[in-house]
Amino acid sequence: MDGLKTSMMRKLANKVVNQSLRVGKRPDGNFESVRIIYNPTDPTCYKFAQIVEEECWKVGAYTTLVYQSDERTRLRYQLTPEESLSKINPITKAIVETIDVNIFIGEHDNPSWSIDVKDKIKIDAPNIQKLREILDNRRVRWLYFGWPLPGTAKGFGVPLRHFRNIFFNSIIESFSEKMMKLCRYYYEAFLGHDIVEIKATDGTDLSFSIKGRRILVDDGIVSDEDISNGDVGLNIPSGEVFIAPIEDTANGKIFFDDITITGFGRAKSLWLTFENGKVNGYKAEKGEENFTKFLDANTGEKDRIAELGIGCNPGAQYTHGSIIVDEKIYRTIHIAIGNNTGSYHGKNKASSHLDM
């Protein structure tokens, strides 16, 4: 599968707008406002974004279509004076205070884009965190729709055709009955349990409490129940059961063969140790400095346990770095550190959320 036909794009866009996000009218009777951000480095990504916008128009929604690429973001940090970066962008603030739905379509087209601008990113990080809080407090529904970009495939060293096949198979499986059943199975497996222990033959031995925390399901739909509970976010590819651990309870160590640190590259053979919920040590055979740069560039509870997730998408396969697919692989688990407010129902406030 080299790509999706226009008819399939239209079918997926219709599901996104009418089934997943249920775009339409606000409770006050006015039509909703939708921001759609897409990555312009691949024409098919732009085409799909346009089709999503057209489906929004059909239900009366007001839209704004905005492009965003890693190179443009990097250039903005390079050119913008520090004084300006230290203040919140009033245009962006006005948008996040207005929109009802926020859709991102694409991926990071350069997995290492931010390494040489990390000091500028750190200046801007509190503003990013504040914008996230505004969206969370307003319960803005959001969707991250992953799209296989040539730059992403190149950055991960994966042939583009194979990369696209994995992505599109997992996207199509996102709406399957089989995936729904797997999500339900793992949701029920969490019920009635307070402690999670992760152990493996590589020496991983990590435990934490989930007592009283909501068990969350990313099944490709924001239902009325989800909205009433504040569960307003979605990924596509979907297929995950996840939960925010009690933030000060993680203790032990965990090993990762290979992780992608968005914007900063990779770390291989990474060990993390936790004490009272916080990363208190780490080492890697390769790329340890990338993990350090990531932590240095972010603010808030960037190094505290944030999430445990279990993959439930039978169509997902390993992409060598696109976490939106990799974390959905059936029979895999992942954890995250950093922000877990809003739809995660956690307490960490941070400018970052790193899935591993």
Image (cartoon, rainbow, N blue to C red):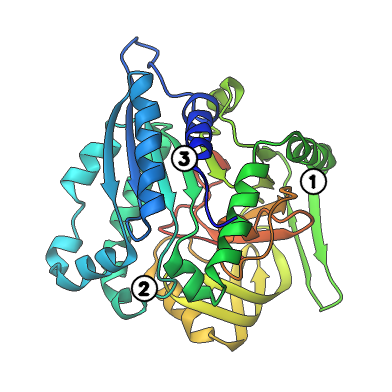
Examine the rendered structure and indicate whether residue 187 appears above or below residue 338.
above
Q: Quadrant of residue 317?
A: bottom right
Give residue 113's mark: 2
Position of 264 with respect to 277 (left or right) is left
Q: Quadrant of residue 58?
A: top left
Residue 262 shows up from this direction = no
SS class of the residue under badge 3? helix
Looking at the picture, which amino acid does disc 3 mark?
A: Thr
Whole-angstrom CA distance, mark 1 to mark 3, is 47 Å
| Residue furthest to the bottom | 285
First of labels 2, 3 by sequence position:
3
Whole-angstrom CA distance, mark 1 to mark 2, is 40 Å
Residue under label 3 = 6
SS class of the residue under badge 1? loop
| Foreground: disc 1 or disc 2 | 2
First of labels 1, 3 by sequence position:
3
Examine the rendered structure and indicate whether residue 260 appears above or below residue 21.
below
Pointer 2 with pointer 3, Cβ within 8 A: no
Q: Please provide percent x and percent y for residue 27.
A: 40, 13
